[in-house]
Structure formats: structure tokens, C-alpha cells
């Protein structure tokens, strides 16, 4: 993963906007209050694109980003500089006991990251359950599935597992507040949005 993103980090923001659908909608669906004093953790925060948007929109929000890629985090450090008093970044894999958080988390956000945790997506969901306080929210937008074996293999080559495996696992662990699957690229692949609550 570190090697993959050492090559991708430079181009990431310039190219990914065209197909990482649903990211802004998911942030809206969090329904945060304008004066929110909550703490939000983005897992696989990449270049910090979502963290900057959230920090700009919610001046009281405390934000934490975690990622395994040094190169993506280097970009995130630069892009979030204006909000560095409210945004903390950690370089670590997200799994039980990999790094300590000293506060309960109100929202855990995964934006096109969880399909890249292979292995590790189940451990990441277990950690999210641990980190959230009861009533805390999890929000996920990610690739869902594809009818094309060729496209599935291409995505796999790019470290993305696209087997429709995440949505049932999320629905099993969290109370569903919202979910939707959507078609993209004329039906070549689907993505999903999920917002859930820890019981
Ligand atoms: C496609 S990028 C998404 C970045 C950002 N969330 C966005 O929406 O633009 C996926 C990110 O997940 C990170 N990642 C992959 N496996 C990880 C793991 N086990 N723990 C933490 N981050 C991971 C990658 O390094 C990469 O920065």
C-alpha cells in the first residue's frame, strides 16, 4: 500500500474526483450541526480532502486522520495546515491496538478506503466499534460491486476488493440509518453509501 501510494500521491487529487462518487453527499448525510463540537475520525484519510472540507464547514469540529501511507499523509499535512490546531494525523494501520486514541469518537468516516484493507477490513470494523461511543456514527462511501470479471480483476490489481462484501458486514455490526447503492460508468460498477449507529 505504501509503495502503491508513493507513486499515486502526487496525482491523487487531480484524478480521483472524476470517479470517487458520493463523497460530498456522505459528508452532508452526517447531518453535523454547524456548531458541532464533536470528534470525527477519518480512516484512510489520504491527502486530507475530506478533512479540509469538514474543518472549513464546521469550525468547532475536532478531526483526526489516520493512514498507512507516508506519502499521502505528507500531502495531508500540507493541505490541512490552515486547520492544524483542530486536525491531528496519525501514520498507522487502522486495526485494534495499533495506536491509541485518548477520547471517544463521535463519527468514524471511511471514504473509498475500506475496500483497500485486504486483509484487514474486518479488523478495521472491529476497531471502529471499539472507538465509537454508544450512539456514535459510522459513515462509509466505497466501491460496491461489478458485473464485469475483467473490471474486478483490474480493481484487484489496484488493491481494491469489489465483491459486495462490505455492506452486509456494516449492516450486521451497526444499526442502519441510511444506505444506498448506485450505478456508475453506465453500469460497469456500483458504489454505496452507508450511515450507521453503534447501538
Ligand atoms: C483511495 S484513498 C482514499 C483517500 C480519502 N479518504 C478520499 O476520500 O480521498 C485510500 C486510502 O486508504 C489508505 N489505507 C489503505 N489501507 C489502510 C489501512 N489498513 N489503514 C489505514 N489506511 C489505509 C491508503 O493509504 C489511502 O490513502
Image (cartoon, rainbow, N blue to C red):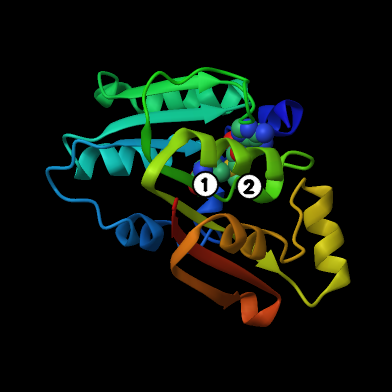
Crowd class of label 2 (few under 14; some 14 to 19; many from 20; radius 10 Å): many
Q: Are marks 1 and 2 in contact (CB under 8 Å)?
A: yes
In this rendering, would 45 be left or right of 103?
right
Q: Residue, x 63% and y 47% (percent of image)? A: 114
Q: Nearer the viewer, residue 93 or 151?
A: 93
In which of the image's four quarters is ligand 1 placed? top right
Position of residue 26 relative to residue 149, above or below, is: above
Pointer 1 residue: 110
Q: State the image coordinates of residue 111 (x, y, percent, origin top left).
A: 51, 49
Q: State the image coordinates of residue 171 (x, y, percent, origin top left).
A: 57, 63
Pointer 2 residue: 114
Residue 34 can be seen in this image:
yes
Number of numbered markers? 2
Q: Residue, x 56% and y 74% (percent of image)? A: 181
Q: Nearer the viewer, residue 131 or 20?
A: 131
Picture quadrant where residue 113 is located: top right
Q: From the Cβ of disc 1, is ligand 1 less than 8 Å away?
A: yes
Dot 1: what SS? strand
In this rendering, would 110 be left or right of 126?
left
Q: Residue, x 87% and y 70% (percent of image)? A: 149
Q: Nearer the viewer, residue 144 or 170?
A: 170
CA distance for labels 1 and 2 = 6 Å
Amino acid at each position: 500500500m505504501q509503495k502503491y501510494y508513493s507513486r499515486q500521491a502526487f496525482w491523487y487529487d487531480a484524478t480521483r474526483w472524476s470517479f470517487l462518487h458520493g463523497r460530498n453527499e456522505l459528508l452532508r448525510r452526517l447531518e453535523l450541526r454547524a456548531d458541532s463540537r464533536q470528534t470525527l475520525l477519518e480512516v484512510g484519510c489520504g491527502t486530507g480532502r475530506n478533512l479540509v472540507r469538514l474543518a472549513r464547514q464546521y469550525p468547532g469540529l475536532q478531526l483526526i486522520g489516520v493512514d498507512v501511507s507516508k506519502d499521502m499523509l505528507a500531502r495531508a499535512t500540507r493541505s490541512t495546515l490552515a486547520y492544524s490546531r483542530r486536525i491531528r494525523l496519525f501514520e498507522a494501520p487502522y486495526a485494534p491496538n495499533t495506536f491509541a486514541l485518548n477520547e471517544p469518537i463521535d463519527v468514524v468516516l471511511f471514504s473509498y478506503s475500506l475496500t483497500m484493507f485486504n486483509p484487514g477490513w474486518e479488523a478495521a470494523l472491529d476497531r471502529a466499534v471499539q472507538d465509537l461511543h454508544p450512539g456514535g456514527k459510522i459513515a462509509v462511501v466505497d466501491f460496491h460491486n461489478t458485473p464485469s470479471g475483467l473490471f474486478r480483476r483490474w480493481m484487484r490489481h489496484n488493491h481494491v476488493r469489489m465483491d459486495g462484501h462490505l455492506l452486509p458486514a456494516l449492516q450486521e455490526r451497526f444499526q442502519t440509518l441510511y444506505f444506498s447503492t448506485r450505478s456508475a460508468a453506465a453500469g460497469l460498477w456500483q458504489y454505496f453509501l452507508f450511515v450507521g449507529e453503534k447501538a
